[in-house]
Image (tube, rainbow, N blue to C red):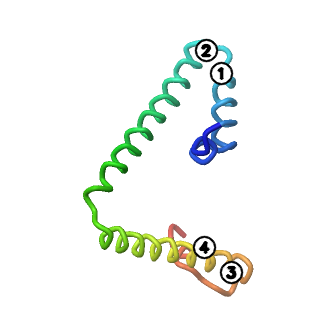
Amino acid sequence: MPLAMPILAGPGAISSIIVFAESHDEIGIAHKLLVLGVAASIAIYIYVTFRLAAMSDRLFNDNVVLIVNRVMGLIIAAIAFEFLLDGFAEHFPGIETIHDHEGH
């Protein structure tokens, strides 16, 4: 078993495909072929994306990669901080977050 398969398609995705493929028995083989086609198209998309990412490695030098890594780390830290604030707001009703004002 290749290591990338469980990372790309975890147990949730695999079980969702199995349940979705078996959920419409009245349609029959056409539905299962459709699900297979969707899964195959996603696999091809991921393959092309990985090949392009491997080729783009030659386009960027080490400084560009370092800058992109730091910016992405900053974005992930901001998202994590937002999750923390939302969690605190759920447990302490006196705290308001930006999500308290959206759509209410």
For the N terminus, the image quarter is: top right
Which residue is found at the position 54% from the left and 24% from the top? 36
Q: Which residue is mark 1?
A: 24
Q: Which residue is mark 2?
A: 27
Q: Secondary structure at mark 1?
A: loop
Q: Secondary structure at mark 4?
A: helix
Q: Earlier in the sequence, mark 4 or mark 2?
A: 2
- CB atoms of marks 2 and 1 within 8 Å: yes
Camera-nearest residue between 15 and 58: 58
Distance (Cα) linking label 4 and label 2? 42 Å
Question: Identity of the amino acid at label 1?
Answer: His
Q: Secondary structure at mark 3?
A: helix
For residue 38, which numbered disc appears in the image? none
**Nearest-to-viewer mark from 4 and 1:** 4
Residue sticking out furthest to the left:
59
Q: Which residue is mark 3?
A: 88
**Is residue 78 shown above or below 2?**
below
Q: Earlier in the sequence, mark 4 or mark 1?
A: 1
Distance (Cα) linking label 3 and label 1? 42 Å
Q: Secondary structure at mark 2?
A: loop
In the figure, is residue 61 to the left or right of 85?
left
Distance (Cα) linking label 2 and label 3? 47 Å
Q: Earlier in the sequence, mark 4 or mark 3?
A: 4
Q: Which residue is mark 4?
A: 83
Give coordinates of residue 11: x percent, y percent: 69, 42
- CB atoms of marks 3 and 1 within 8 Å: no
